[in-house]
Structure formats: structure tokens, C-alpha cells
Image (tube, rainbow, N blue to C red):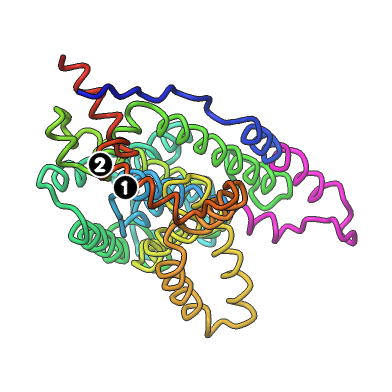
Amino acid sequence: MTAVTLPKKGPLLGGKGWTAFFVALIVVCAVAPVLNMVVPAGSPLHMSDYAVALVGKIMCYAICALAMDLIWGYTGILSLGHGLFFALGGYMMGMYLMRQIGRDGNYKSDLPDFMVFLDWKTLPWHWTFSDSFIATLILIVAVPGLIAFVFGFFAFRSRIKGVYFSIITQAMTFAAMLLFFRNETGFGGNNGFTDFKRILGIPIATQEMRMTLFALTGLTLLGFFLFAKWLIASKFGRVLQAIRDAETRVMFSGYNPLPYKLTIWVISAVMCGVAGALYVPQVGIINPGEMSAANSIEIAIWAAVGGRATLIGPIIGAFIVNGAKSWLTVAYPEYWLYFLGALFIAVTLFLPNGIVGLVRKWLSREKAPAGVSAGRKEAQRAMAAAQGVEPEALHAPLVAEVKGARA
């Protein structure tokens, strides 16, 4: 039997990677606050409050795109329902922010205004811990995680996959949206939650608080990126990629895919929940529209445009698509959806590996020796694999590792 040398675990990031990471960290924590709070408003270098809110919102979306990459790009599970987990995290934070309004509402009541309008006398049971910030932080993680665990356990145990899984996740999100639209559920109905006043007793509508939320969002995005890099580089990450490429072979090698798929599914849901919680105080509203099917589909589009199975690609895709959306919805609002559809079709047909894949392909051609084209190199690798000379790139190391463990 041919011995296969397992790849050595490399550093979390290379030299250029760490440089880019610390540059992003400095921009989020130092450059942006200075441009917004120190540079005068008339200066061309000034970062407006609108730009702070917009970039902060897009960074929340980038966290969702990163979460999508973990389950779709690295595990092969396409979810069209991640908008649900994003909205659940947002609602948990929104409930706390509504309680923080206190008697500053229109009705001067301890109850939120919408409850007074509906003639509610007491808070529903699920609002019990909504006045505690610590409990809210726990619920932001626990609620999306628990729902994802229950749904994922039954779906993965039943071996539902492919387009059927995608349809079920979208149906789940749509059902939740209809539930939250109902006034009797205690989530504000169609209007949702808005008119937030303060967080931790500090007014939200101040420049300092907006910049604090901006920096927290940026730090969270960078932290999740490092966590995802570490996770994918671990043995757990190699199993995920093997499941994506050959789940049956993974099972024959002695691994049960269920706990791996369920774990990454819950992690991805929790990441979206955290993103939703950061999104709400910056945008100032949360309603059932965040659970719409279109929002969940957009998360998949961000990952596809940037490049699946790259981690950095979905983040780039979120910035590009939402930046274009912000401009087009103002300049050409009636054409935005056509642009989004055309973009997704173009990426599917011409850029299957997204923008990052295109850049990597271009760089590999630049570095290729003279006379050896990228197509020829691909053909050589395919012939070697067919002849059994070179192991399959993703799951052969895992199979060898399993065989060594069984020996």
C-alpha cells in the first residue's frame, strides 16, 4: 500500500495575512474613529455618520457570509434559511433595547408601546429576562443555537441533503416570518421593534456610541475570521471538507458525519445570531422582514460572488454586493433586483470560484513557468489522479489518517 504523507499544520496566517489582519484592526479601531470624530465634517477625509452606519451594517452582513461559507463552501450544505438565525439574534437584542426605553415611550408606560396599544397588561413569559444585558447576551447565542440544533439534528439524521435541504430551510424561515407577523406572539407584529433609546443606560443616538458599535462589529468580524481559519485548518475542518467531497467515503472510513455537520451548522447559526444582535442597534429597527426568503438568498449570493471555501471571499462579496446595493437603490431603485439576479447568473456561469478564485487563477498564471499553461497543469493533475499517482486533494489525507489509526 502506498504511504501517504499527511500535510503538516501550517501557521494560522502567513506573513502577508497577519499584515492585512493588523491593518484591518488598525482601520477599525483607530483610523475610522479619527476620521469620524476628529476630522472636521467639511474635510474630504471626514467619515460621515451615514458611512459609519453603512459600513457597520455591511460588516454584520459579512459575518453572515462567513458563516455561510463554513457550511456551504467547506461542508457542502446550502442553507436558504440563515436569515432566520440573523433575525433571532436581532430580536433578542431588540427585546432588551425595548425594555431600556422605560417610560420614555409615547405612552409613558413600563411596557413597550406596541403592548400598550394592544391593551396588554403584563409582559409575556418570553420577555422575562429581557431587562438583563447578561441574559440577553446568553439568549443571543442560545436561541439561534438551540433552534439550529433541533432542526439540524432531525434533518441530518434523516440524511436530507442537496436541494431538498435548501428548500426545507427556506420553508422554516418563511414559517417563522409568518409567526412573527402575528401580534399575539409579542414581537411587535408587522412593525417589529424600533425607537430605541439607550443601551446599558447610554444613549444610542450619539457619535461615541455609534463608533463603539462600529468598532465592536469590526472586532467581532475579525475574531470570527480567525476562528474560522483555525477551525478549517484543524482535523475537524479536514473532515468537513471530506464530507463535502465524498460523504460516503468518510462513512466507510469510520467517521459519522452527523456530529460534524450538526456542529458546524450550529456554529454557523450562532455567528448569524451575533451578527443580528450587532445589526439592530446600528440600524435602529428589527421586524419580520429580516426573515424573508430574499434576505436568506442574498447571504448565499455574497458567498458565491466573493468565492466559496476561501473565508475572505464571502467577506469581500458582502462588501461588494451591499455597496452596490446601497448605491443602486438610490440611483436606480427599480433596477436593483435585476442587477442582483444578473450578478448571480454571471458568477454562476463565468466565475464559479468567485472573485477570489478569479484573482488566484490570475496569480497562478503569472507565476507559472514559461510554456506551461494553467490548463496543461490541470490536465497533468487529473491524469496523475486517474493513474493513482497523486491522492485526491481534499479527503485522501483524511482517509490515510483513518487507515493509520485503524492499523
Quickly name the residue at label 1: 383
In this rendering, does residue 118 appear at all? yes
Q: Which residue is mark 2?
A: 387
Residue 360 horizontal/vertical position (percent): 54, 50
Is 8 drawn above or below residue 209 in the view shown? Answer: above
Badge 1 marks a residue whose secondary structure is helix
Pinpoint residue 209: horizontal percent, then vertical percent.
67, 45
Q: Is residue 307 left or right of residue 79?
A: right
Say what amino acid the circle numbered 2 marks. Gln
- Side of 303 where 127 appears, left or right: left
> What label does residue 262 carry, if any?
none
| Image marks 1 and 2: residues in contact by CB distance under 8 Å | yes
Q: Is residue 272 visible?
A: no
Residue interval drawn in magenta: 26-55
Count of numbered circles on the image: 2
Q: Main secondary structure of the magenta part?
A: helix
Which amino acid does the dot numbered 1 rest on?
A: Met
Nearest the viewer among 49 and 21 is 21
Q: Quadrant of the N terminus?
A: top left
The single residue placed furthest to the bottom in the displayed view is 334
Q: Does the magenta run of residues contain 214?
A: no
Return the x and y of residue 259 as percentages of the image width and height: 21, 33
Which residue appears farthest toward the front when viewing the image? 371
- Graded by Cα atoms within 10 Å as few (under 14), some (14 to 19) or many (20 or more), the crowding at tag 2 reads few
